[in-house]
Image (tube, grey):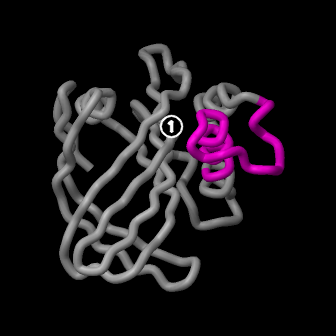
């Protein structure tokens, strides 16, 4: 792990590291979940996130648990944490974030997923820090059993700015 990632892990309270998951809608639960997601995603034995991405100019990271369901019309809801990296490379304390959404199209089924957003530009980081926002874009997802793959593109507008993914 990079030293920056180690700093992030140290921000997560030892009290939340128990084997039993706290309620995911509490700050302790969101931090516990984020730690578990990153441990699995950064495990060198899995095909997860390359740790080299944490060496670059990473401005922030968001880890969100999302539940989606629908048939032609669908919706989603999620909670998680957002961290930003300061000028000196230090990570901020985690902030709670949430999302809700609706959509339509060729939708059939339900899924629960853990999403890790790596944020590499200041405009996107600034737009995510807003009080309210809207995201427009497209998404394609295939889920079979415990495996899924998602491709997504969009633009995020908020009262703090504009960003893309």
The residue depicted at 32 percent of the width and 63 percent of the height is: 75
Q: Quadrant of the N terminus?
A: top right
Q: Position of residue 13 (x, y in %)?
A: 73, 28
The residue depicted at 68 percent of the width and 58 percent of the height is: 44
Q: Is residue 1 left or right of residue 137?
A: right
Q: Residues within 10 Å of mark 1 (few under 14, many from 20)?
A: many
The quarter of the picture where residue 158 lies is: top left
Q: Position of residue 150 (x, y in %)?
A: 37, 69
Q: Does residue 79 sit above or below 92 in this rendering?
A: below
Q: What residue would you read off at disc 1?
A: 81
**47 or 69: nearer the eye?**
69
Q: Does residue 36 sit above or below 14 in this rendering?
A: below
Q: Does residue 145 sit above or below 57 in this rendering?
A: below
Question: Do we see residue 165 in this rendering?
Answer: yes
The residue depicted at 48 percent of the width and 14 percent of the height is: 88
Q: Is residue 102 left or right of residue 27?
A: left
Q: Is residue 17 magenta?
A: yes
Q: Position of residue 159 (x, y in %)?
A: 18, 27
**18 or 36: nearer the eye?**
18
Q: How many marks?
A: 1
Question: Do we see residue 1 in this rendering?
Answer: no
The quarter of the picture where residue 147 lies is: bottom right
Q: Start and end of the magenta stretch?
A: 14-37
Q: Is residue 133 left or right of residue 113?
A: left
Q: Is residue 148 magenta?
A: no
Q: Position of residue 47 (x, y in %)?
A: 59, 67
The residue depicted at 62 percent of the width and 52 percent of the height is: 37
Q: Is residue 136 left or right of residue 59?
A: left
**119 or 142: nearer the eye?**
142
Secondary element under disc 1, as helix, strand or loop, is strand
Q: Does residue 47 sit above or below 95 in this rendering?
A: below
């Amino acid at each position: 792990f990079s030293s920056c990632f180690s700093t992030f892990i140290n921000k997560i309270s030892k009290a939340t590291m128990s084997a039993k998951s706290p309620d995911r809608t509490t700050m302790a639960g969101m931090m516990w979940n984020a730690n578990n997601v990153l441990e699995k995603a950064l495990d060198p034995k899995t095909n997860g996130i390359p740790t080299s991405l944490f060496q670059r100019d990473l401005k922030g990271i968001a880890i969100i648990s999302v539940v989606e369901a629908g048939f032609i019309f669908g919706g989603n809801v999620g909670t998680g944490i957002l961290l930003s990296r300061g000028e000196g490379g230090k990570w901020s304390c985690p902030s709670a974030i949430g999302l809700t959404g609706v959509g339509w199209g060729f939708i059939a089924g339900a899924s629960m997923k853990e999403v890790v957003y790596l944020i590499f530009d200041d405009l996107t980081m600034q737009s995510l820090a807003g009080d309210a926002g809207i995201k427009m874009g497209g998404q394609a997802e295939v889920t079979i059993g415990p495996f899924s793959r998602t491709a997504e593109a969009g633009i995020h507008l908020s009262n703090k700015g504009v960003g893309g993914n």
